[in-house]
Image: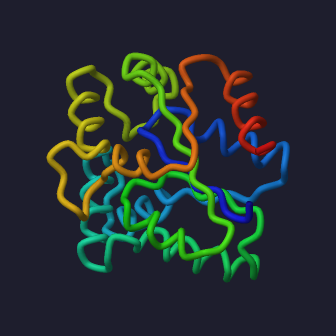
Amino acid sequence: MNIIGIVGPFASGKGVVTDYLIKKYSYTSFSLSTIVHDEVKKKGIAHYDRTVLQNTGDELRKKEGDGVLAKRAVQQLKKKSGSLTKIVIEGIRNPGEIAYLRTIPGFFLIAVDASREIRFQRILKRKKPWDPTDWETFKKVDGRDRGDKENTNGQQVKKCMEMADVKIENNGDVKNVEEEVEKILKK
C-alpha cells in the first residue's frame, strides 16, 4: 500500500493508527486538518473551536471542490518528498477526498471508530483547545462531523466510513488497535 487513508470521527483513534504506521513501518503522515488550521490562521483567527474548523473546511470545499483537502495534501507531499510512497493521510471527512485519492494507485482506506462516550472521555483528557468540553456541544459537533443534516461540501464522516476498505473498532486500548492494524497489513 502506497497511500493509506484514515477516516473516523474525532477522538476515535485515527492518530493512534497513524502513529503506529509511522513508528513500525516508517510511513510519512499528513493530516488534512493541517490545511484547515492553516486557513483559519490565514484569516487571523487566533482562538477557535471545532465549529470554526468545520465552517472553514466547508468553505474550502464549496469554493474549490469536495476533494480540495486531499488535492492540496498530495501537492504538498509531492513537493516535499517527490513521491507518494508509504504515506498516511489522516482526517478524511468528505467523499470527494476519497474519490480523489482513489485515482492514485495503491490507495487503501481504513475507518476507525469508537463509541461516543469513549470519544468524549478522550477529548476531555487530551484537552485540545478547539474540542468541545461539555456533552451537549460534543453531540452537536459530532453530529455535524458525521454528516447529520450536512450539505455535500460539509463533513460526511459516516459516508466516508462506509466507503472504507476495512474498519477498526477502537473501544479498547492502544495494543488492540495495533493488533488490528497488523491484521490489515498482513492481508
Q: Position of residue 12 (x, y in %)?
A: 49, 32
Q: Position of residue 115 (x, y in %)?
A: 42, 21
Residue at 71 percent of width and 73 percent of height:
84
Vertical placement of residue 155 versus 82, above or below: above
Quarter in which the N terminus is drawn: bottom right
The picture places residue 129, in percent across and down from the top left corner, at 41, 38
Q: Which of 22/181 is in front? A: 181
Q: Is residue 170 above or below residue 88?
A: above
Q: Quadrant of the C terminus?
A: top right
Q: Is residue 75 above or below residue 53?
A: below
Tell me if 177 is positioned left or right of 130 in this view: right
Count of residue discs: 0
Asked if residue 158 lies left or right of residue 17, the reply is: left
Could you tell me residue 31's position as x and y percent?
A: 55, 56
- In-image side of 14 versus 37 (left or right): right
Q: Is residue 172 left or right of residue 138?
A: right
